[in-house]
Image: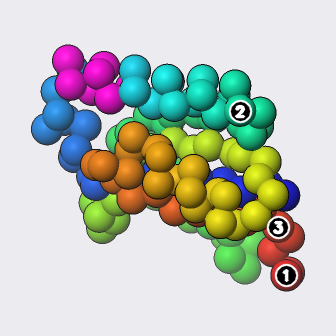
């Protein structure tokens, strides 16, 4: 069964952390990804750039709405994700507790499934 770990970062945390500390936490995350790969549970992993250049698109009644980032109303942004193949939700939650980012972010565990379920 597939589970996604969403890394929810407080907005502005990267700037406050600075380059050197940012490189250190990124190295920790790369090491964590490699360990998950070695264990055979990692399907995909990506770090995301800040939402400064992001866009939100909606189409309602045939009309497009576009909002450029950063999205100041949001307290957190999605900083990255891990897509895992786990036997149970409990296994995915256990892996989330091992994630280094759990020390400075929120790691949300979501089962992958259809939107109608």
Q: In this rendering, which labeled residue sits more in front, label 3 or label 2? A: 2
| Residue at x 76%, y 64% (from the top left corner) | 88
Query: Does any portion of residue 66 appear in the rendered image?
Result: no
Number of numbered labels in the structure image: 3
Asked which secondary structure carries label 2, the reply is helix
- Residue 94 locus on image (x, y percent): 56, 57
| Residue at x 21%, y 25% (from the top left corner) | 21
Query: What is the chief secondary structure element of the magenta stretch?
Result: helix
Vertical placement of residue 97 versus 52, above or below: below
Name the mark on residue 68: none
| Residue at x 72%, y 79% (from the top left corner) | 61
Q: Determine the CA span between mark 3 and mark 2.
A: 23 Å
- Residue 111 locus on image (x, y percent): 72, 65
The residue identified by callout 2 is 39
Asked which secondary structure carries label 1, the reply is loop
For the residues bearing labels 3 and 2, Cβ distance under 8 angstroms: no
In this image, 27 relative to 41: left or right? left
The residue identified by callout 1 is 117
Asked which secondary structure carries label 3, the reply is loop
Categorize mark 1 by other alpha carbons within 10 Å: few (<14), some (14-19), many (20+).
Answer: few
Q: Determine the CA span between mark 1 and mark 2.
A: 30 Å
In this image, 65 relative to 101: left or right? right
Q: Is residue 54 magenta?
A: no
- Residue 92 locus on image (x, y percent): 65, 57
Vertical placement of residue 78 versus 48, above or below: below
The image quadrant that residue 82 belongs to is top right
- Residue 78 locus on image (x, y percent): 46, 51
The residue identified by callout 3 is 113
For the residues bearing labels 1 and 3, Cβ distance under 8 angstroms: yes
Q: Earlier in the sequence, mark 3 or mark 2?
A: 2
């Amino acid at each position: 069964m597939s589970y996604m770990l969403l890394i929810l970062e407080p907005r502005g945390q990267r700037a406050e952390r600075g380059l050197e500390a940012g490189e250190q936490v990124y190295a920790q995350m790369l090491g964590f990804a490699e360990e998950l790969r070695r264990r055979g549970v990692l399907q995909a992993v990506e770090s995301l750039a800040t939402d400064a250049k992001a866009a939100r698109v909606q189409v309602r009644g045939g009309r497009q709405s576009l909002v450029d980032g950063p999205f100041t109303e949001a307290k957190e942004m999605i900083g990255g994700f891990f897509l895992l193949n786990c036997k149970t939700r409990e296994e995915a939650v256990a892996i989330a507790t091992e994630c280094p980012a759990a020390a400075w972010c929120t790691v949300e565990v979501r089962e992958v499934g259809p939107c109608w379920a």
